[in-house]
C-alpha cells in the first residue's frame, strides 16, 4: 500500500498526496477506522481511500473535512461492492 512509502516511487507519490506527516497520519487513522468498522483489510481500504482522496483534493477548498468525507465515500463504495458480492454468493448457494 502506498501509505507505507516502501518504494522510491511510493515516496514521491506520498509527497504529492500528503502535505506533511501530520496529514498522512490523520488519513492513516481514518483508513484504519474504516477498515475496522467494515471488516475489510487496511490495504484494500487504503488503495480505495487514496484514490478517492486524490479525486477530492483536486476540488477541495477546505481540506479539514477530507478525512470524514473520504471515509464516508469509501465505506459507501465498499458496502455497495460487498453487498453485490454477498448477493451473488447467496444466489449461487441456492442453486
Image (cartoon, rainbow, N blue to C red):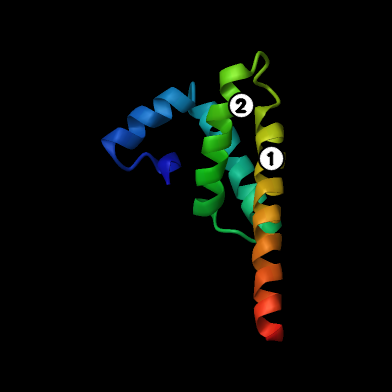
Q: Residue furthest front?
A: 95
Q: Residues within 10 Å of mark 2 (few under 14, many from 20)?
A: some
Residue beneath disc 2? 56
Q: Is residue 71 above or below residue 90?
A: above
Q: Is residue 5 above or below residue 18?
A: below
Left or right: where 48 falls relative to 8: right
Left or right: where 59 falls relative to 76: left
Mark 2, secondary structure of its residue:
helix
CB-based contact (under 8 Å), mark 1 and mark 2: yes
Q: Nearer the viewer, residue 51 or 81?
A: 81
Sequence-first tag of 1 and 2: 2
Q: Nearer the viewer, residue 8 or 48?
A: 48
Residue 82 figure quarter: bottom right
Residue in the picture at 57% in, 49% down: 45
Left or right: where 73 falls relative to 18: right
Residue beneath disc 1? 73
Q: Nearer the viewer, residue 85 or 50?
A: 85
Q: Residue furthest bottom?
A: 95
Q: Residue furthest top?
A: 61
Spatial CA distance of label 1 from label 2 is: 10 Å
Q: Quadrant of the C terminus?
A: bottom right
Total labels: the figure holds 2
Q: Residue furthest left?
A: 8
Residue in the picture at 66% in, 33% down: 67
Where residue 63 sits in the image (x, y, percent)? 65, 20
Residue 5 figure quarter: top left
Amino acid at each position: 500500500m502506498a501509505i507505507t512509502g516502501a518504494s522510491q516511487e511510493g515516496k514521491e507519490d506520498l509527497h504529492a498526496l500528503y502535505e506533511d506527516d501530520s496529514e498522512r497520519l490523520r488519513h492513516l487513522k481514518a483508513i484504519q477506522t474504516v477498515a475496522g468498522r467494515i471488516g475489510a483489510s487496511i490495504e484494500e481500504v487504503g488503495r480505495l481511500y487514496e484514490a478517492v482522496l486524490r479525486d477530492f483534493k483536486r476540488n477541495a477548498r477546505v481540506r479539514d473535512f477530507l478525512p470524514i468525507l473520504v471515509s464516508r465515500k469509501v465505506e459507501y463504495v465498499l458496502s455497495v461492492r460487498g453487498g453485490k458480492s454477498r448477493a451473488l454468493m447467496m444466489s449461487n448457494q441456492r442453486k
